[in-house]
Amino acid sequence: MTNWNLTFNRPIGFFIMGFQSLPDNSKYYFIFLAFVYIGTLVGNMFLMMIIWQSETLHTPKYMVVFSLSIVDVSHSTALIPKCVNQFLFDSRIVAYNLCLTQMFFVHFFYIIESYSLVIMAFERLVSICFPLQSSTIITNTRMFGIIVFSWVLAFAILVAALVLITHLSFCKPVPTVMSYFCDHGPIFQIACSDNTPNWKIAYFFTFTVLYVPLGFILLSYVFIITAVSQIKSVDGRWKTFKTCSVHLILVAIFFIPILVTYTIALIYTKIDGNTRILNTSLSAVLPPLLNPIIYTLKTEEVLQQMRKFLRKRSVKPLLICRVANPCRRK
């Protein structure tokens, strides 16, 4: 009797499993994601337009906000449309190259979002702890360089992870991925060949994308709180710390859900597939939707520029109406 031990260095594609125990009801969830995507596009495009057209917002702080909006739109575009197509139209088999492409861009923009929050913390740290020197320490040129460096670093990490994926062998021509997209971890874990290097880079990824950024942000706020506590007036302390409130909300929205998932996975080794998918998907799609809303509603500078923008748009039709004879009241 012959024992065939077939492996595939390059499978035809991957079958994306999605939710396991509620396949019918899960379609409503992905319809919800489609609306989240539309809201993400509208909100971030509007915020970028406000920043682009307002010269008063052409500062290092809003360079990071503008970059974050680009990342939010790009991350959602790399993730949500493909998920909606897969689960609403039952197109769950993703070609090998297309799967690796999605894996790259989803994780690439996820890393940059994490690093963008770090850059924001650094900007707040310098502005509050060194108010007199902040304009010379962080210029637009230097901020642009920091942003570019974060993109290059994210690119290097993802290229290394992707190269290791291409060295894996799989036992089936179309392996099943227990996730809602071409996720790095669920793919290398189903490989037949040795995936030890992939585990190492996964730990490195978690450390450099989650724990180090969060640690830097928390340390920054230790110095910020120390500096704020030295301000004599209560009103001055509140106004200064209020400038950090938006950033703290964004940090909480981004880090808490994914850290809870990773912590549970580390403690209990295995986590329910549906719980993991729900948690990771919400932590991936909600921050890009909420970021522009929070920045628009909670930042006075953006609110002022938004009011000016809307007033200009409302004045133009009135001017046209006055010039044109048909619009005159008889």
Image: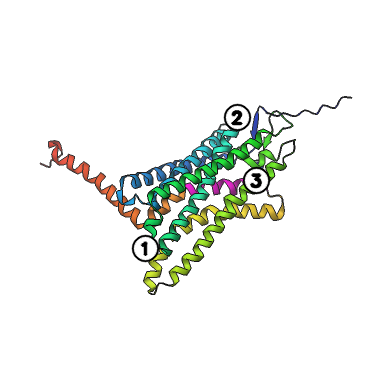
Of residues 43 and 72, the one nearer the viewer is 72
Q: Residue 129 appears in which quarter of the rendering?
A: bottom left
Of residues 135 and 3, the one nearer the viewer is 135
Q: Residue 202 carries which label?
A: 3
Please state if 312 lies on the left or on the right of 221 as rendered: left
* Residue 18 makes an appearance in the image: no
Q: Label 2 neighbourhood size at 10 Å, few (<14), some (14-19), many (20+)?
A: some
Q: Which amino acid does label 3 sit on?
A: Ala
| Number of dots carrying numbers | 3
Please report the residue visible at 70 percent of the width from the left and 56 percent of the height from the top: 267
Q: Residue 19 appears in which quarter of the rendering?
A: top right
Disc 1 to disc 3, how far (Cα)? Answer: 42 Å
Expressed as whole percent of the image width and height from the top left, the position of residue 133 reads 38, 61
First-in-chain label (2 vs 1): 2
Disc 3 to disc 2, how far (Cα)? Answer: 20 Å
Q: Label 3 neighbourhood size at 10 Å, few (<14), some (14-19), many (20+)?
A: some
For the stretch drawn in magenta, the main secondary structure is helix
Give the residue pinned by disc 2.
97
Q: What residue type is labelled 1?
A: Leu
Q: Is mark 2 on a helix, strand or loop?
A: helix
Task: Tell me the magenta residue range.
Answer: 272-288
Quadrant for the N terminus, please. top right
Q: Which amino acid does label 2 sit on?
A: Asn
Please report the residue visible at 51 percent of the width from the left and 65 percent of the height from the top: 222
Evaluate if marks 3 and 2 touch, with contact meaning CB atoms under 8 Å apart: no
Q: Residue furthest left?
A: 330
Q: Residue 330 appears in which quarter of the rendering?
A: top left
